[in-house]
Image (cartoon, rainbow, N blue to C red):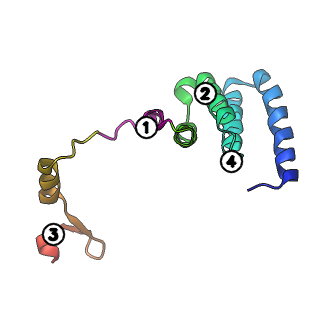
Amino acid sequence: SFTDAERQQLDGLISNLESAAPQLERRVQGWSYAAIGHLQLRLGRLEACRKALDQARKVLGDDTGSHVFYCRAICLQRLGEGEAAQTALANLVPEIPEIELSMRTYWRTVRECKLFDFETGEWHTYAAAA
């Protein structure tokens, strides 16, 4: 939580950065919008956060860092947009596969999962570890 004086100071910094950003080199401009988005998130200004992070993604394109997707997912979740938040997280970590949750997958997981013994550096089945 910020004091009123801190909020006023942050508002001034955000305003200055918003004014300067369009003249900055592309990556610096994009990260400036990302920083604004993060500050707006911390200040609880969710629509302003979304706008800044969307601008960061637009400017950075393929160079958009994971921090932007993470902050955007938090913002969207707080706005009540759970599916959009999930999409933002999928962009953050696209290699996480979707898994069908069923009794079949449960039993396969139980059968295939093992425990790692940090003392010996070896993997053990549940039965061997018992």
Q: Residue 23: x percent and y percent?
A: 79, 21
Taking the spot 12% from the left edge, 55% from the top edge, the residue there is 107
Looking at the rendered image, the quarter that the C terminus falls into is: bottom left
Q: CA distance from mark 4 to mark 2?
A: 17 Å
Secondary structure type for disc 4 = helix
The answer to if 83 sits in the magenta stretch is yes
Q: In this rendering, is residue 4 above or below 88?
A: below
Judging depth in this view, the residue of 98 and 46 nearest the camera is: 46
What amino acid does circle 1 point to? Gln
Check disc 4: other Cα within 10 Å, few if <14, some if 14-19, many if 20+.
some
What amino acid does circle 4 point to? Arg
Q: Which residues make up the magenta segment?
A: 81-97
Judging depth in this view, the residue of 21 and 106 nearest the camera is: 106
Q: CA distance from mark 4 to mark 1?
A: 20 Å
Secondary structure type for disc 1 = helix
Mark sitting on residue 126: 3
What residue is pinned by disc 4?
A: 42
Secondary structure type for disc 2 = helix
Mark sitting on residue 54: 2
Nearer to us of marks 4 and 3 is: 4
Mark sitting on residue 3: none
Nearer to us of marks 3 and 1 is: 1
Q: Residue 41: x percent and y percent?
A: 66, 43
In the rendered structure, are the residues bearing label 1 and label 2 in contact, judged by CB atoms less than 8 Å apart? no
